[in-house]
Image (spheres, grey):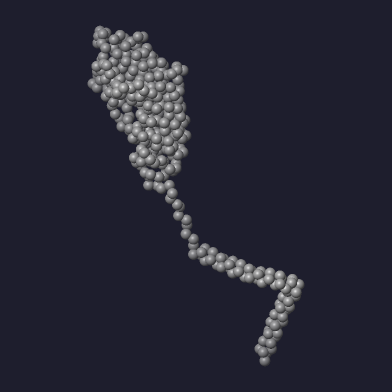
Amino acid sequence: MCNASTLSILNLAHNNLTGLVPQCWGTFPSLWALDLQDNNLYGSIPDNFSNGNAFKTLKLNGNQLKGPLPRALAHCTKLEVLDVGNNNIEDTFPYWLETLPNLQVLSLRSNKFHGVIASFGIKPPFPSLKIFDISDNYFTGPLPVSYIHNFQGMKDANDNQNGLKYLGDNSSYNDSIVIVMKGLYMELTRILTVFTSIDLSNNMFEGEVPKVIGELHSLIGLNISHNRITGTIPLSLGNLNNLEWLDLSWNQLKGEIPMSLTNLNFLAVLNLSQNQFEGVIPTGRQFNTFGNNSYVGNPMLCGFPLSKSCNEDKERPPCSTLDKEESGFGWKVIVVGYACGMIFGIILGCNVFFVGKLEWLARLVEVVLNVRLIRTNIANHANGWRRN
């Protein structure tokens, strides 16, 4: 087929083709759509893409391709869709693709990409990107904040849209993409130009969820699950008014679930399981539709829909019978002593006031002595009676 230089569309997807990808296909001046997905092709991707080529769609996903991603792809300045997912490509993040002005779909999922993702410094990088899928790789370091902050295509995807539009609308080839949508693998047989999603799941990212994600107002799907993300959920996620699914499961997130997430009126799927969240689960709007599976593995969470109530009082241990008896006895002694002391004090006060201190005191001494004398006489009399 190397003689078919006038070919514009080559679609050999979903067959049992084996062998290498012909190098000559990268030099066809009129070829703008090459779809070889879901075959058994092996070897490396052609590295001879020339300047000024016509490629808009390049789909090599679902094969056994290996080696690095060729830098010659940076020559494909008209490229809109690049899907090399589900291969054995081993490389660092292709930062040099950030210069492509028309790239809207980038899928590197399920390969052996690795290392820290750092921007090359182009501003803005990936200016038109709307689908960013780098899941199931070996990326490390913090989440790519410098890219997320500049995903302009995910901030205003709905602007200036009159009716539904698809990628490649005015052509005989329909772009498609396989993504994880709401927890399920799904193939979009046509890609709406307003569809936006980010999938960073199943890597080794660390650090916190960047607040700038809240600026992607057109974002429909966000998946950061199965990483090593720490910190809390930023309140800014409540600004993602078009978000339909949010998966932050299997990380090390902590703190309370922010009430701002209840502002997400289109949120249909929420997965916060297997983290370290605590406190009361927010209620209202879409949060009233989520089940236990959204929160499993967070033992410090409470409230609907969990069976654990937030106002459960711990039962106080019952007092023993002995404690109760001792407590009652002590209380009685105190009351009796207090009453006697009070009566004695009143009598003493009245006598001192009305009779006079010295006179009353003398009488009191006299009474005490007389009482002692009487007791002595009685005792002597009793002893004499016993002798007789």
Q: Quadrant of the N terminus?
A: top left
Q: Is residue 160 above or below residue 337?
A: above
Q: Is residue 121 visible?
A: yes
- Hey, which quadrant is residue 364 in on the image? bottom right
Q: Residue most toward the left?
A: 15
Q: Is residue 61 above or below residue 255?
A: above
Please tell me in which quadrant of the rendered image residue 32 appears. top left
Q: Residue drawn at (39%, 41%), measured in percent from left and top?
A: 283
Is residue 387 left or right of 218 when viewed as pictured? right
Q: Residue at x 70, y 80 (%)?
A: 371
- Tally of numbered discs: 0
> Can you say whether 315 is above or below 158 in the image?
below
Closer to us: 297 or 177? 177
Q: Name the residue furthest right.
A: 358
**x, y percentage for residue 124?**
43, 18
Q: Which quadrant is home to the C terminus? A: bottom right
Image position, residue 200 (x, y; %): 39, 28
Where residue 18 sits in the image (x, y, percent)?
26, 19
